[in-house]
Image (cartoon, rainbow, N blue to C red):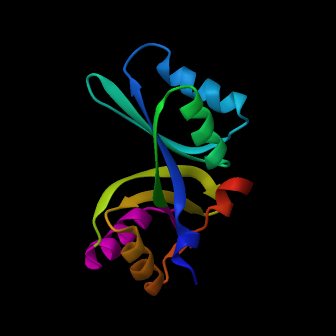
Amino acid sequence: MDINDYKITQISVFIENKKGRFYNVTKTLKESKVNIRAMSLADTMDFGILRFVMDKPKDAYDSLIEKDFIVKKNDVLAIAIKDESGGLSELLKIISDLDLNIEYMYTFVNALENKAVMLFKFEDIDLAIEKLLDENIELLKEEFFKRV
């Protein structure tokens, strides 16, 4: 088992809080034939951070850099959980008991039948992968986002 197989490439784009900036990002991805699979937008007074996973992360990164966006790549984990009341709470209990620090998380809706998929950014992703696999937590690989 190679822990790198479980690392999902996430693209973060820093955009000004101005009309049309979010559209310009999605337009760039459309022109590059990149399909967004999951996304989160957090904002402050002056700028937003658009985080997403997609089917072609290299193409997304390259096309956004070419259009002069401020872009960063990092790794997240995709975790499949029971799609029922308490499913997320059960996972968060395990993560808490394992003493893993979550920096942020967001969801990928309707990804699997009877399961939800949560994307997590951990402080130490390698440690998180090892500990979560030891607990038989279902981690998805990047190929999952290419075929969904």
* Image location of residue 45, percent across then percent down: 26, 23
* Image location of residue 132, percent across then percent down: 43, 78
Residue at the spot 54% in from the left edge and 59% down from the top edge: 8
**In the image, residue 97 above or below residue 87:** below
Residue at the spot 48% in from the left edge and 51% down from the top edge: 107
36 vs 135, nearest the viewer: 36
**In the image, residue 48 above or below residue 1:** above
Residue at the spot 54% in from the left edge and 51% down from the top edge: 108
Residue 12 among those drawn in magenta: no
Q: Is residue 148 visible?
A: no
**In the image, residue 71 above or below residue 147:** above
Answer left or right for 12 relative to 33: left
Residue at the spot 55% in from the left edge and 21% down from the top edge: 23
Magenta range is 77-99
Q: Find the residue positioned furthest to the top.
A: 19
Q: Quadrant of the N terminus?
A: bottom right
* Residue 102, picture quadrant: bottom left
**In the image, residue 145 above or below residue 86:** above
* Residue 129, picture quadrant: bottom left
* Image location of residue 134, percent across then percent down: 44, 86
Q: Quadrant of the C terminus?
A: bottom right
* Image location of residue 18, percent across then percent down: 40, 15
51 vs 57, nearest the viewer: 57
Q: Is residue 69 visible?
A: yes
Residue 87 among those drawn in magenta: yes
44 vs 73, nearest the viewer: 73
Q: How many marks?
A: 0
